[in-house]
Image (cartoon, rainbow, N blue to C red):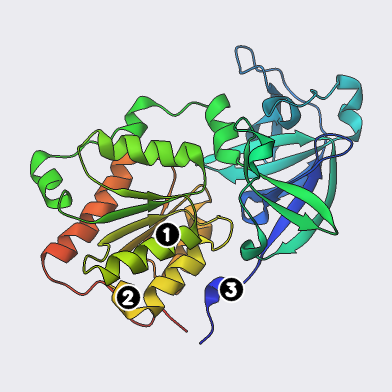
Amino acid sequence: MKSKANESQGMLLFRLSATQTFALGTLKVREIVPFCPLTALPGSHPTVIGTANIRGITTPVIDMAKAIGYQPVDKEEYKNCFIIITDCQRRVVGFLVRGIEKISECDWRNITPPPETLGTRAFLTGVMNVDEKLVQLLDVELVMSKIFPMPEDKLHPILADVDREKLKPMHILLVDDSSLARRQLSEALDSINIPYVVSTNGIDALEKLKDSAREGRPFDIVVSDIEMPGIDGYELAFEIRSNEPLSEAYLILHTSLSSEISVDRAHQVGAHEALTKFDATELVNAMLRGAMLKLEGEHVRLEGAIE
């Protein structure tokens, strides 16, 4: 049996300093452009160096090095720099970087969590070896949260009391490698008094799913990130659908990627929904749809999802 989740995603490798290479998943990247003239943006975050007109879209440009604590890019360096245009968390943003190295094929199973020696302040979700060199995978969600804080109305869901009582009995698993995303998910459900279990990556989540099924209490609803080290969200979805004791979970892939990109593939691997981070009310309503199916005794496994 072949999983559609096994298709590898490219990694864009780039430099923020002379010695350290960083990476972004190519699904987040719209295009790469040489540095171009910028328009000042008064009152913006100190890491926003201006805006660029990219294909008719006014795009804020962030000095990525400065944003994660490295030496800021001097204006004299701009002419040799590149801007990575990303589509992340419902926002088009440009990241100024000192150099582009290459696009490398990547199996998410080969990405490991960042070592503790890098410290808790590191804006990282994982590390990998490319050509015998350590490459750090940036936590773009965390970077974005520091520069464009999420409005409060997006962080706390609006839910009627009667709907909360339908959701409360559900056994819910939240899976995300980003500490920021886990905190947002937890705060959203805590605010409406809904119990849940948290996992930091796909491998741990799969173990929790199997253990819970063996104990006779399989998870009813799984909310998972897509880009994660070890097993990504697509692969986790495929594993859930391929394993009969787990296959009745209502599966929501929750991602910073554009939903236009991810929704079709999410359905291919057996997920019911794909949502773009972060709108707490939208997410809780998706979970409620799953709860309603479970409470009505409906089978939730998507037929024909596995190839």
Q: Nearer the viewer, mark 3 or mark 1?
A: 1
The span from disc 2 to disc 1 (Cα, nearest Å) is 20 Å
Q: Residues within 10 Å of mark 3 (few under 14, many from 20)?
A: some
Q: Residues within 10 Å of mark 2 (few under 14, many from 20)?
A: some
Residue 213 is situated, as x and y percent measured from the top left of the image, at 28, 69
Q: Which amino acid is tagged 2? A: Leu
Residue 248: give x, y in percent of width and height: 27, 72
Which residue is the site of mark 3? 6
What residue sits 61% from the left and 72% below the top? 7
Amino acid marked by disc 3: Asn
Report whether residue 272 is seen. Answer: no
Q: Which quarter of the picture shows residue 267?
A: bottom left
Q: Earlier in the sequence, mark 3 or mark 1?
A: 3
Taking 156 as reference, is 296 above or below it? below
Tell me the SS state at disc 1: helix
Q: Among all residues in the image, which is located at the extreme bottom?
A: 1
Q: Are marks 3 and 2 in contact (CB under 8 Å)?
A: no
Binning the other alpha carbons within 10 Å of mark 1 as few (below 14), some (14 to 19) or many (20 upward) gives many
User: Disc 2 marks which residue?
Assistant: 302
The answer to whether 91 is drawn above or below residue 46 in the figure is below
Q: Which residue is mark 1?
A: 205
**Residue 69: image x %, image y %?**
71, 25
Q: Compare marks 3 and 2 and give the one earlier in the sequence.
A: 3
Disc 3 from disc 2: Cα separation: 19 Å
Q: Nearer the viewer, residue 162 or 35?
A: 162
SS category of the residue bearing label 3: helix
Residue name at image x 62 percent, y 30 percent: 121
Residue placed most toward the observer, 214 or 179: 214
Query: 117 left or right of 287?
Result: right
Residue at 86% from the left image edge and 28% from the top image edge: 78
